[in-house]
Image: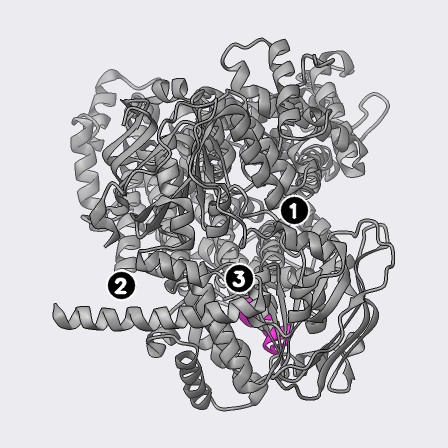
Amino acid sequence: MFTFILRRIVSGAVLLFVISTVAYFLLYLGGGDIARRILGQSATAATVAQKSHELGLDRPLPLQYLSWLGGAVHGDFGSSWFTGEPVATAITSRLAVTLSLVIGATVVSAIIAVVLGVWAATKRGWIDRVVQVVSILGFAIPGFLIALALVLYFAIALKLFQPTGYIDLGTSITGWLSTVTLPIAALSIGSIAGITAQVRGSVIDALRQDYVRTLRSRGLSSRRIVFKHVLRNAGGPALAVLAVQFIGLLGGAVIVEQIFAIPGIGNVSVTATSQGDIPLVMGLVIATAALVVIVNLLIDLLQGWLNPKVRLS
Amino acid sequence: MIDPNPAPTTAAQVVRVSLFRRLLKHPTGLTAMIFLIVIVLSAVLASVLAPRNPDLADINAVLANPSLAHLMGTDSAGRDVFSRLLFAGRFSLAGALLALVVAAVIGVTGGLLAGYYGKWFDAVSSWLTGLLMALPGIVVLLAARAVLGPSMWLSMGIFGVLMSPAFFRLVYASVTAVRNELYVDAARVSGLSDARIIGRHILTVVRAPAIIQAATIGGIAIAIQAGLEFLGLGDTSIPTWGSMLNDGFTNIYTNPLLILWPSLAIGLTCIALTLLANAMRDELERSSSKPKRRRGAARAMVSIEKEPVLVHPEVVTEREFGEELLKVSDLAVGYDQPDGSIKTVVQDVSLVVRRGEVHGLIGESGSGKTQTAWSILRLLPEGGRVVGGSIFFEGTDLAHASEREMTRIRGKKIAYIPQEPMSNLDASFTIGSQLVEPMRVSLGISKAEAKKRALALLAKVGIPNPERTFAAYPHEVSGGMAQRVLIAGAVSCTPDLLIADEPTTALDVTVQAEVLDLLRELQAEFRMGVVLVTHNFGVVADLCDQVSVMRDGRIVETGPVKSIFADPQHPYTRSLFAAILEDGEARGPLVEHAVGSATSVTPTAAPREGASS
Amino acid sequence: MSESLLVVDDVVVEYPIKGFRTPPFRALKGVSLDIRAGETVGLVGESGSGKTTLGRAVLGLAPVTGGAIRYRGSDISHLGRAGRRALSSEIQVVFQDPYTSLNPSMTIGQILSEPLTVRKVSQRDASARVVQLLDQVGLPKGAEDRLPREFSGGQRQRIAIARALALEPRLIVCDEPVSALDLSTQARVLDLFRDIQEETGVAYLFVSHDLAVVRHLSHRVAVMYHGEIVEWGDADQVTARPEHPYTQRLFLAAPVPDPVRQEQRRADRLRLAEQQRELAVQGGAVV
């Protein structure tokens, strides 16, 4: 088990390193004359050269990268070219907001999806058909359209929730709830649909396995078999989908935060992108990649716990 | 002798035509397809259909409501929304198509190569897909936008690369599955080149799932492209559904209607694509589920004419049997069909099992022997049920018992030994826990007591190291060991009746002999009644007291084993005996014929003498 | 040796095992036998004995890491793809599973004509040959336009045999070709194998776990155990009066379909097991 964890951690670190390298070279090579872009067309050649030197852009790229990497290992990701704010602080302060949305949505969708999926798989009949149709629609409609619909209806028409803005969890729990409920709902619907379909499918599949018949022949009730044996065996594929959905939710949050004007990482990304603030963009890529690596590691560990074959291989 | 149709249609055509045709009969599939065709046509013909220039701004008619002049009103710059929507469709659809093509080309080729050739290409590409999938697409697109500027085509190209793992994984999985199929081996032995094998045997398998995947990916591409434009990070020089949505959102308080039109276009297109994908998947599964023949799958009986069962009279044996345990009378088993009818797979089956007696059910596949066994346990697969007759066991009619009653009886009174040892153990739990759990539930004993009994049982069924096997997972033991574990589980609650469904069929012949010995010992020790399902006359001869020969869901002949083996009456039973090879003559050494070039008639001596000592 | 069609000479097959410095798995540990033209050599063994691997090695589907497989005098154990392709009209195969050995999306006509058309046989001649093949294996006319799923297990195995015959090979490797079939179907398919051999003079390497099946069809029989041939010789002698202890166990383990004789065989088997145990103990004491 220990080597299993160690191997996953090492491979995660390698993945992160490769992503950072590729991203760095692409971002800094693809940008053309960066100083010129920051200063605009009217700036003189001298000021552009001056700016280049200031930002350290006149050094060879591999050297720039090495110094960035050296800083990054110690948590220093440089500073924004436009605000001068350190990238690390700019991101961490907003990451908490985004994470509260994304984790909230993951938990909500996992719970609802497992309930719906098991229900549909064990009851079948019309319940199953309704769940299937709803999950197809939920999967098909883009999340931001759902978000727009929710804003229009619940916030603007019914005035049940705040249409925009964010209240920190530490400030007021009810305030936080009133601001995150709609965004979480908008984010969750798509992933509920995706996970439900997977849970339903793998539960039906697991129920057809030979060992289910054998366990029933030993006098175990169907309920017990579903909750102890079938769910555990169906858990593996469902977890894999959950990991994919988490990545999707991170992306979805970028757009949903724009709609609800929530000061999360999406907000920073859009600003940084439209300004061409490369250090900030670089930091964002690293932050999301790191999150994804961590989530995948957790999922792998859970998989190992669920499935002895994974653990031992 | 010449084929009247010299040019057979290729397999590819057969599959594609039939999938398309079947889609036309699928209501949602057809609706989705028609909708998509309309959308595509309206985008292609935008310049003909659009009443106005989509970029013509009319300062006097900013944010106008729908009217005859402007069917859907105008936007914040006074441009005609309807015209813009049509032209935007062009760019949105073309962008999605670009992403789709890029993803499909990279993913399908990569998947084919990695799946078929494996080795280093396999490792590298799997790692690359892992890398691509580790990042949220939108973040990468934002990063690319930061450096490369707002080009819709570029974004969609990059998005195509990001989505290529979806195709890669699908194709890779299908190819690796197919690569090891025997028909690909056969094609290789037939002298087909790799290119032909991939084209003919592998692409045909991959094509349909890839088309389905394409519909899904197309929907996602449209959504993500609209998302980017909606964030205001798109190309402002071209109209797209996403940028129209952005315009609507900024004017959400003044004119909420503006947001409706692009939302409808995006939402409906995405839904249509997903529904189409689902419809295709439905149809594909329906067509591929037919050839699959699962073991024990119910097959309808052919030509059932009721005929009297040949019953051999009781003979006196040295073996003594106790009271009647099980009495099955006129049992019929049926499966519900989608059209509401019932397909009968077992009919008029009657048999009696006394305490200490082994009753064999023998027959070929589809004879209903396994269905009969499962119906006694009331563990028929989905859709199957007892549709007639009775199954009396210790005074209860199991055919009409409630599920609760059955749960009480199963395990404790009637136990079951399955055919496949490996698939009948839950791979996620240790062998020990799978033995302990039922004992605790059925007998209500403590965990420690159950463990003690489980270890004793494992020793009893001949497992050399019970402690180790108790703690092992099913995949850590051999098939023969796993079957012993299942037997231990079956007798763990000292049942009165044992249903053994081909208990030795999956085992090697030397292991089979040992397992048969074990079954005989346990049966004698617990004085169990046994229903033994098998297709092997040797197993019947070894273990059974009574035997019933089944064909097409009915018993044709029944009686004491010795009398049936000595004097089979029914023509079917006789034909089965005639097919047995065990007592046949050996073919003898090769004799020089007109054919072949063999000259020697005596076999050469073993080339490696040492091997046989 | 020159009269032998195929000579398997001290062949070793090893599969690499994942992991650093893990020794490869030896599926065959130096196996030798030969097959003459028109002869059936039966290969018996239990799962994991290496019998299927030997068949696959002859077909070029398993990695031969030692020894040689000579077909009509020339070594074919390390042929490239082109060489194997050339050999495909000489050596053919019938696999065990009639459900996965035929491509489900191709019609019978396509399956049977494929090996011909890749050899530039005209469509017309190929169709004629298909009709002839179907007739040879006892399938009804019109079968060529149907898909494999429309046929029963026994019929599918006939189709597989027809495919193997399409190129008129001199040797067919048969890997458990009847073990997935019902008893009565099995007998009919075995008869077909025999008829075809008598008609065409093709040789078989017939792999099976069933001593009775092998006895019925083989001229000579080799018994495999743990990757080695432990007994090899005349079919009647090996399958009825085996000499090697393992073959003896194998012989007595198969139950006879006769309650009286089975009781006798059971007693014999237990006695043999007892004897062999004692021998092993004595052997252990000596060494």
User: Magenta part of the protein: which range?
Assistant: A217-229
The residue that appears at 30% across and 44% down in the rendered structure is: A16
Tell me the mark number nearer the camera, choosing from 2 and 1: 2
Could you tell me which secondary element the residue under label 2 belongs to? helix
Q: Residue at x 31, y 49 (%)?
A: C231
Label 1: how many residues lie within 10 Å, few (<14), some (14-19) or many (20+)?
A: many
Q: Position of residue B505 (x, y in %)?
A: 53, 60
Q: For residue A216, which quarter of the picture? A: bottom right
Disc sitting over residue A2 in the figure: 2
Identify the secondary structure beneath mark 1: helix
> Residue under mark 3: which chain is it in?
C
- The residue under label 3 is C256
Is residue A245 in view from this perspective? yes
Q: Is residue B229 visible?
A: no
Q: CA distance from mark 3 to mark 1?
A: 71 Å
The amino acid beneath tag 2 is Phe
Identify the mark at residue A146; answer none if there is no mark.
Answer: 1
Local crowd at mark 2 within 10 Å, few (<14), some, or many (≥20)? Answer: few
